[in-house]
Amino acid sequence: MGLARYPEPHTSLRDLPSDATRAARAGASGIWAGAPARAVVRALLAALPGAPVAIVLPDGEEVGNGVRPIARVRVADLRTLLGLLGPASDLHFGDAYADGRIEVEGDFLGLLESVFAAPSDGWLARLGSHWRWLLRHGNSIRRARSNVHHHYDLGNDFYALWLDREMVYTCAYFPTPAASLEDAQVAKMEHVARKLRLNAGESVIEAGCGWGALALHLARHHGVRVRAFNVSGEQLAWARERAEREGLADRVEFIDDDYRNVRGTYDAFVSVGMLEHVGREHYGDLARVIDRTLAPHGRGLLHSIGRNRPLEFSPFVQRRIFPGAYPPTLREMVALLEPVDFSVLDVENLRLHYAHTLEHWLARFEAHRDEVARRFSERFVRIWRLYLAGSIAAFRAGSLQLFQVVFARGRSNAVPWTRADLYRP
């Protein structure tokens, strides 16, 4: 099973700076090279001021920006080079890297981190923002299921190659940087449980349960009953089989349905890694679900990749990795809760924990890259390498955040007096 190819985006000459426009026009005649090509490279490097990178042209000429490069980007042909200057340059770079038309020599992660650390208010960023807006689609129930299938139904055996033994595909919580990924994922699940202040016998609703690890952890270690919703067939099959094998099927119910169809009343609501897939246009739907299902004394937790200011995921991520996804700002997460009068009790940012989680994932992925290539393709391997490495760089550079928000009904006094219990040994 592979990833679908999409037609290359059209780049209008009107969108390019004058030097690059002249280069494009010359290229249409098949004669441009030398100075025109260098003009395109200078425009690219100007969008990344101070980035320690050099670009190697198809004829072997290396163009830099006066900074000692930590990486060199080799571009196979002039069409690929020109595509890097368009509004969907991120998607073009990703596809060209996947196809082998772009190669990176040197510090791949350092290169990506410098890209994410570059100012995001230049002309190239504005064009990219416009293109990302054009890619947006509403996440109807039908489309949401299709989007989930695109990413999460690639096969449980694929994810088992590089996730931890609990099959947790969200940010871990490292008590120390030296903790193993396995220990850090268990620590994350326990961290979530402590924030929810669960008591034995209570009921929990989970929206978007992945392979079921959190639901099973809460039932096993905190004595609660969990109803967990998901629309990934592969993940649900894994979760149900595991619940049966571990004798927890009477306490954890895995339901193949959209979060918008949740009914009943529960003591706690939890969603880890699903809000990114809801879409801003459906935040009201999620808020109404939480409002109608949470008991008067109830409390909840939202865990999501986020931004410091509104910005879509890149075209590459939206088209090749997570269709329909959007990383909310903290303000947008809190605003989701305001119309239904929920009080925010606790906010934590685990950005560096997610970068470290991804470092573990990438190392394990690379250890199995030959097997992944046999199952899918070399192109698939390169797409996923870029996705995992780019995510590490984005979290390191602060382009992405990881927010955990704990909340309760505004009139509820069943709230913690201090936060000390969250960090007890």
Image (tube, rainbow, N blue to C red):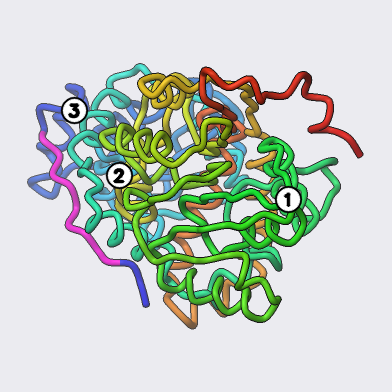
Residues shaded magenta: 4-12
- Residue bearing the label numbered 3: 16
What residue lies at 28% left-to-right and 62% top-to-bottom? 146
Query: Callout 1: 10 Å neighbours few (<14), some, many (20+)?
Result: few
Q: Along the line of sight, which residue is nearer the eye, 230 or 394?
A: 230
148 with respect to 71 (left or right): left
- The answer to whether one can see residue 309 in this image is no
Lower sequence index among marks 1 and 3? 3
Q: In the drawing, what numbered circle is on residue 81?
A: 2
Which quadrant is the C terminus positioned in? Answer: top right
The residue under the point 62% across, 24% down is: 347
Q: Determine if the magenta segment contains residue 5.
A: yes
Where residue 222 appears, as percent x and y from the top left, is 74, 52
Mark 1 and mark 2: span between their CA atoms? Answer: 60 Å
Q: Report the disc number at residue 401.
A: none
User: Mark 1 falls on what kind of element?
Assistant: loop
Magenta segment, prevailing SS (helix, strand or loop): loop
Q: Is residue 199 above or below residue 17?
A: below
Q: Find disc 1 in the rendering and name its residue.
A: 200
